[in-house]
Amino acid sequence: MLRPLLDSVVAAFPLNVKEMLALIDELSIKAGSDLEAVLDAPEATTAPASTVPFLPDDLLDARQGVFQKVLWEANRCYDNACYNACATMLRRLVEALIVEAYERHGIGTRIQNGNGDYLDFSALIGKATSEPVLRLTRNTKRVLPNVKFCGDLGAHNRMALVRKADLDRLHDGVRGAVEELSRAVAAGRA
Protein backbone atom coordinates (compact mmCIF):
# COMPACT_ATOMS: atom_id res chain seq x y z
CA MET A 1 0.00 0.00 0.00
CA LEU A 2 2.89 2.35 0.66
CA ARG A 3 4.86 1.35 -2.46
CA PRO A 4 2.71 3.40 -4.92
CA LEU A 5 3.11 6.50 -2.73
CA LEU A 6 6.87 6.01 -2.53
CA ASP A 7 7.03 5.59 -6.31
CA SER A 8 5.08 8.84 -6.73
CA VAL A 9 7.50 10.69 -4.42
CA VAL A 10 10.48 9.41 -6.42
CA ALA A 11 8.80 10.38 -9.70
CA ALA A 12 8.08 13.91 -8.42
CA PHE A 13 11.67 14.47 -7.28
CA PRO A 14 13.25 17.02 -7.95
CA LEU A 15 10.95 18.63 -10.53
CA ASN A 16 7.81 19.09 -8.47
CA VAL A 17 8.74 19.85 -4.86
CA LYS A 18 5.20 20.93 -3.89
CA GLU A 19 3.69 17.64 -5.11
CA MET A 20 6.52 15.71 -3.48
CA LEU A 21 5.86 17.35 -0.09
CA ALA A 22 2.13 16.60 -0.35
CA LEU A 23 2.92 12.97 -1.16
CA ILE A 24 5.35 12.75 1.77
CA ASP A 25 2.61 14.09 4.08
CA GLU A 26 0.19 11.49 2.72
CA LEU A 27 2.82 8.79 3.10
CA SER A 28 3.46 9.83 6.70
CA ILE A 29 -0.24 9.72 7.55
CA LYS A 30 -0.71 6.34 5.87
CA ALA A 31 2.35 4.79 7.52
CA GLY A 32 1.35 6.21 10.91
CA SER A 33 -2.22 4.92 10.70
CA ASP A 34 -1.08 1.47 9.56
CA LEU A 35 1.43 1.30 12.40
CA GLU A 36 -1.15 2.51 14.91
CA ALA A 37 -3.62 -0.16 13.78
CA VAL A 38 -0.99 -2.84 14.26
CA LEU A 39 0.07 -1.55 17.67
CA ASP A 40 -3.51 -1.13 18.89
CA ALA A 41 -4.62 -4.57 17.73
CA PRO A 42 -5.05 -7.05 20.56
CA GLU A 43 -2.26 -9.55 20.75
CA ALA A 44 -3.01 -12.66 18.82
CA THR A 45 -4.30 -15.25 21.21
CA THR A 46 -4.82 -17.75 18.48
CA ALA A 47 -4.21 -21.17 19.81
CA PRO A 48 -3.12 -23.84 17.41
CA ALA A 49 -6.12 -25.62 15.95
CA SER A 50 -7.12 -28.19 18.48
CA THR A 51 -7.75 -31.77 17.55
CA VAL A 52 -11.06 -31.56 19.40
CA PRO A 53 -13.53 -29.02 17.98
CA PHE A 54 -15.55 -26.71 20.22
CA LEU A 55 -18.65 -28.66 19.17
CA PRO A 56 -18.33 -32.10 17.59
CA ASP A 57 -19.29 -32.44 13.94
CA ASP A 58 -21.35 -35.55 14.61
CA LEU A 59 -23.99 -33.54 16.49
CA LEU A 60 -25.65 -32.95 13.13
CA ASP A 61 -27.11 -35.41 10.67
CA ALA A 62 -24.89 -35.91 7.61
CA ARG A 63 -27.76 -34.68 5.40
CA GLN A 64 -27.75 -31.30 7.13
CA GLY A 65 -25.06 -29.79 4.90
CA VAL A 66 -25.79 -26.11 5.52
CA PHE A 67 -25.92 -26.66 9.27
CA GLN A 68 -22.68 -28.65 9.15
CA LYS A 69 -20.99 -25.77 7.32
CA VAL A 70 -22.20 -23.25 9.92
CA LEU A 71 -20.97 -25.54 12.72
CA TRP A 72 -17.63 -25.91 10.94
CA GLU A 73 -17.34 -22.11 10.75
CA ALA A 74 -18.21 -21.74 14.44
CA ASN A 75 -15.50 -24.26 15.33
CA ARG A 76 -12.91 -22.50 13.15
CA CYS A 77 -13.80 -19.17 14.72
CA TYR A 78 -13.35 -20.61 18.21
CA ASP A 79 -10.03 -22.27 17.28
CA ASN A 80 -8.75 -18.95 15.92
CA ALA A 81 -9.86 -16.85 18.91
CA CYS A 82 -12.59 -15.10 16.88
CA TYR A 83 -15.05 -15.38 19.74
CA ASN A 84 -17.53 -12.74 18.52
CA ALA A 85 -17.79 -14.58 15.22
CA CYS A 86 -18.11 -17.94 16.96
CA ALA A 87 -20.97 -16.70 19.14
CA THR A 88 -22.70 -15.23 16.10
CA MET A 89 -22.37 -18.49 14.16
CA LEU A 90 -23.70 -20.50 17.12
CA ARG A 91 -26.69 -18.16 17.32
CA ARG A 92 -27.28 -18.59 13.60
CA LEU A 93 -27.04 -22.38 13.89
CA VAL A 94 -29.48 -22.63 16.79
CA GLU A 95 -31.96 -20.23 15.18
CA ALA A 96 -31.86 -22.12 11.88
CA LEU A 97 -32.28 -25.48 13.64
CA ILE A 98 -35.37 -24.21 15.46
CA VAL A 99 -36.92 -23.02 12.20
CA GLU A 100 -36.01 -26.26 10.43
CA ALA A 101 -37.47 -28.39 13.24
CA TYR A 102 -40.78 -26.55 12.99
CA GLU A 103 -40.79 -26.89 9.21
CA ARG A 104 -39.94 -30.60 9.28
CA HIS A 105 -42.78 -31.24 11.72
CA GLY A 106 -45.18 -29.39 9.43
CA ILE A 107 -45.87 -26.66 12.00
CA GLY A 108 -43.83 -23.84 10.48
CA THR A 109 -46.81 -21.48 10.48
CA ARG A 110 -46.67 -21.44 14.28
CA ILE A 111 -43.47 -19.40 14.10
CA GLN A 112 -44.51 -17.02 11.33
CA ASN A 113 -46.15 -13.64 11.54
CA GLY A 114 -49.14 -12.56 9.48
CA ASN A 115 -46.91 -11.82 6.48
CA GLY A 116 -45.40 -15.30 6.49
CA ASP A 117 -42.05 -14.09 7.85
CA TYR A 118 -40.39 -15.99 10.66
CA LEU A 119 -40.52 -14.44 14.10
CA ASP A 120 -37.41 -12.87 15.58
CA PHE A 121 -35.07 -15.07 17.60
CA SER A 122 -36.50 -14.06 20.99
CA ALA A 123 -39.98 -15.04 19.89
CA LEU A 124 -38.66 -18.26 18.31
CA ILE A 125 -37.07 -19.19 21.62
CA GLY A 126 -40.33 -18.51 23.44
CA LYS A 127 -42.26 -20.67 20.99
CA ALA A 128 -39.67 -23.48 20.93
CA THR A 129 -39.46 -23.74 24.70
CA SER A 130 -43.21 -24.19 24.94
CA GLU A 131 -43.64 -26.45 21.88
CA PRO A 132 -44.33 -30.04 23.01
CA VAL A 133 -43.66 -31.45 19.53
CA LEU A 134 -39.98 -30.49 19.80
CA ARG A 135 -39.58 -32.25 23.16
CA LEU A 136 -36.79 -29.98 24.36
CA THR A 137 -35.26 -30.67 27.76
CA ARG A 138 -35.18 -28.22 30.62
CA ASN A 139 -31.43 -27.64 30.07
CA THR A 140 -31.92 -26.71 26.42
CA LYS A 141 -34.81 -24.41 27.30
CA ARG A 142 -32.55 -22.72 29.83
CA VAL A 143 -29.56 -22.26 27.48
CA LEU A 144 -31.38 -20.86 24.43
CA PRO A 145 -31.65 -17.29 25.81
CA ASN A 146 -27.93 -17.40 26.67
CA VAL A 147 -27.07 -18.41 23.11
CA LYS A 148 -29.10 -15.46 21.88
CA PHE A 149 -27.43 -13.09 24.33
CA CYS A 150 -23.89 -14.12 23.34
CA GLY A 151 -24.74 -14.13 19.63
CA ASP A 152 -26.27 -10.68 19.86
CA LEU A 153 -23.31 -9.44 21.88
CA GLY A 154 -20.92 -10.69 19.22
CA ALA A 155 -22.92 -9.37 16.29
CA HIS A 156 -24.44 -6.12 17.51
CA ASN A 157 -22.80 -4.68 20.61
CA ARG A 158 -20.38 -1.87 19.81
CA MET A 159 -18.96 -1.62 23.33
CA ALA A 160 -18.45 -5.21 24.48
CA LEU A 161 -16.81 -8.36 23.18
CA VAL A 162 -17.53 -12.03 23.56
CA ARG A 163 -14.66 -13.68 25.37
CA LYS A 164 -13.42 -17.24 25.39
CA ALA A 165 -14.70 -17.66 28.94
CA ASP A 166 -18.21 -16.67 27.78
CA LEU A 167 -18.23 -19.43 25.18
CA ASP A 168 -16.65 -21.94 27.52
CA ARG A 169 -19.47 -21.33 30.03
CA LEU A 170 -22.01 -21.95 27.25
CA HIS A 171 -20.26 -25.01 25.86
CA ASP A 172 -22.09 -27.89 27.54
CA GLY A 173 -25.50 -26.28 27.23
CA VAL A 174 -25.14 -25.27 23.60
CA ARG A 175 -23.72 -28.68 22.75
CA GLY A 176 -26.83 -30.33 24.19
CA ALA A 177 -29.15 -27.82 22.54
CA VAL A 178 -27.64 -28.32 19.09
CA GLU A 179 -27.90 -32.09 19.41
CA GLU A 180 -31.50 -31.93 20.64
CA LEU A 181 -32.55 -29.53 17.91
CA SER A 182 -30.82 -31.67 15.30
CA ARG A 183 -32.75 -34.69 16.57
CA ALA A 184 -35.97 -32.66 16.48
CA VAL A 185 -35.26 -31.89 12.82
CA ALA A 186 -34.60 -35.56 12.08
CA ALA A 187 -37.72 -36.69 13.98
CA GLY A 188 -39.84 -34.40 11.84
CA ARG A 189 -38.82 -36.26 8.70
CA ALA A 190 -40.63 -39.42 9.72
Image (tube, rainbow, N blue to C red):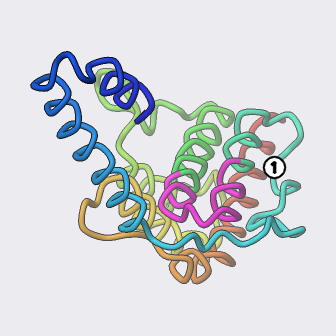
Q: Residue at point 29% right, 43% down?
A: 30
**51 left or right of 47 in image:** right
Assess whether residue 135 is covered by the magenta stretch.
Answer: no
**147 left or right of 32 in image:** right
Q: Amino acid at mark 1?
A: Leu
- The x and y percentages for residue 171 are 65, 75
Toward the left, the furthest residue is 18
- The x and y percentages for residue 175 are 71, 68
Toward the front, the furthest residue is 14
Query: Which of 70/4 is in front?
Result: 4
Q: Which secondary structure, mark 1?
A: loop
Q: Which quadrant holds the C terminus? A: top right
Query: Which of 28/110 is in front?
Result: 28
Q: Is residue 186 above or below residue 116?
A: below
Q: Residue at point 34% right, 18% down?
A: 11
Query: Which of 124/10 is in front?
Result: 10
Image quarter for residue 126?
Answer: bottom left
Residue range (magenta)? 73-88
Q: Which quadrant holds the N terminus? A: top left
Q: Is residue 46 above or below residue 5?
A: below
Assess whether residue 81 is covered by the magenta stretch.
Answer: yes
Q: Which residue is mark 1?
A: 60
- The x and y percentages for residue 174 are 63, 68
**49 left or right of 135 in image:** right
Disc 1 packing (10 Å; few <14; some 14–19; many ≥20): many
Q: Residue at point 28% right, 51% down?
A: 33
- The x and y percentages for residue 184 are 72, 50
Query: Which of 54/143 is in front?
Result: 54
